[in-house]
Amino acid sequence: MARFILSYYCYSKMKNIKNIRFGFSIKSISKFSNLNVTKSDLLRAIDDLEHFERSTRTFDRSKSFQYFQLQSLIILLLNIMLAMKFLLLSITDSETIRLYAGDIFVSSSETKVLNYFCHMGAIMPCMGKIFLLYLNQSERKSFLDIFVEYKESLKGPDAESSLLSTRENLFRKQYYFLIKSCNYAPFVVVSFLLIAHTSMVTINYSSLKLYIMQIIHIAILGVVYYNSIASGIWFIFILVLAALFACNSIDSLITECSKLTSFTHYTWANALSFYHKSNLISNWLDCINMQFAWIFIVAYVYLAFHNILIFFYLTQFKFGYFGVRVFLIFINVLTLTVLYSCNYLGALVGQKTSLLHLAFYRISIDTGNLFDIKVALKKLHFLEQIQARKIGFYIGNYIYLDNNNMLLLTLECGSLYLLFCSNINRNNQ
């Protein structure tokens, strides 16, 4: 009966998702492989994405941001409730509380360890939501504005005003494919989690009453936290898109710098269009650098500490259930991947910024026209901006990679906390 209810829920959820999703077919995927994504195709896909964001109350691209604030507040409260539930399960020994709270980790020897790490994983998205809500309420410019500017450049009749003049086709395909693939990702992830949780409950089956309670709890979690998972995946999609846009934009400007260096004479329209695009990149690169610096430093300290904690558990304790060790190893690998990805991303952007600074420095100022002084001033102004930005990226990389004092402090705090956890674990065995 419980499996029938769960199957009916999955079927109804899939039907609802198909109703609100825009068309995603083999034909749309073939457009990416056939290299024929036009401006009109991408604009229609962006319009459909905005409609989907408003219909699911994930994000509202208007000035009010009402849907985004409402969805963020709901997800923040749900994540806090989920994190508090896992924290309660990690410290309680009451079988009644574990039964009605839907503790899927039946083995009592590993329950507290696994629930603690689930608590950490649930509380981390809350940090990102608090930061985004803070930017919204304080009316500060967010890095999401770059996609509004890009959409306006697609509508512009002048091709020279496009921010991605030399890599436009590549980014269009990437943007189009990400939009099409993002809309089914939440359902796939939720289905995978439901199957994994159901399999774990079935493997650890002890009594019929406990099994039915856990199946019902998993079904409720799937309904309640679907929007939370969808919003988190949407945020990851936006971050990936921003990184692709940054790399393609900087590479496009470097190519244009090389072309301008080879010209002996160029018109005022060429210079104005080129420096206008460089100023657009300056505006949102500064915004991304300042906003991501706080996110990365918090993630670095937080994840580095828990990486040490997971490694300590793997080396100092023996678990009766082999799945616990596999689960901890998976979390450890995922943590290291996030850490090194953040460090690599900061180093990559800093390196590309240095190349762009060098390319601007090599641009010839002697144009043979009366606007030489204006072009020289624009070039000097932009070189000062990009030099400051390059220093900012270098400082960020020092924080991410070379801040030994912060790492030593993390190790010291982690060592003391591990001693505390080991004493609790030994007392409970």
Image (spheres, grey):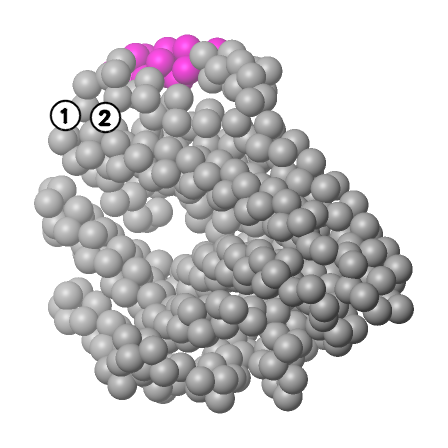
How many marks the image carries: the answer is 2
Q: Which residue is mark 2?
A: 109
Q: Quadrant of residue 148?
A: bottom right
Q: Position of residue 2 (x, y in %)?
A: 17, 65
Q: Which residues are magenta?
A: 416-429
Q: Position of residue 189 (x, y in %)?
A: 30, 60
Q: Residues within 10 Å of mark 2 (few under 14, many from 20)?
A: some
User: Is residue 425 one of those drawn in magenta?
Assistant: yes
82 sits left or right of 383 in the view: left
| Amino acid on which the number 2 mark rests in the picture | Ser
Front residue of 325/6: it is 325
Report the residue marked by disc 1: 320
**Foreground: disc 2 or disc 1:** 1
Q: Is residue 149 left or right of residue 236?
A: right
Residue 265 picture location, percent across and down: 72, 68
- Looking at the rendering, which quadrant does residue 226 occupy? bottom left
Tag 2–tag 1 contact (CB < 8 Å): yes
Q: Nearer the viewer, residue 423 or 407?
A: 407
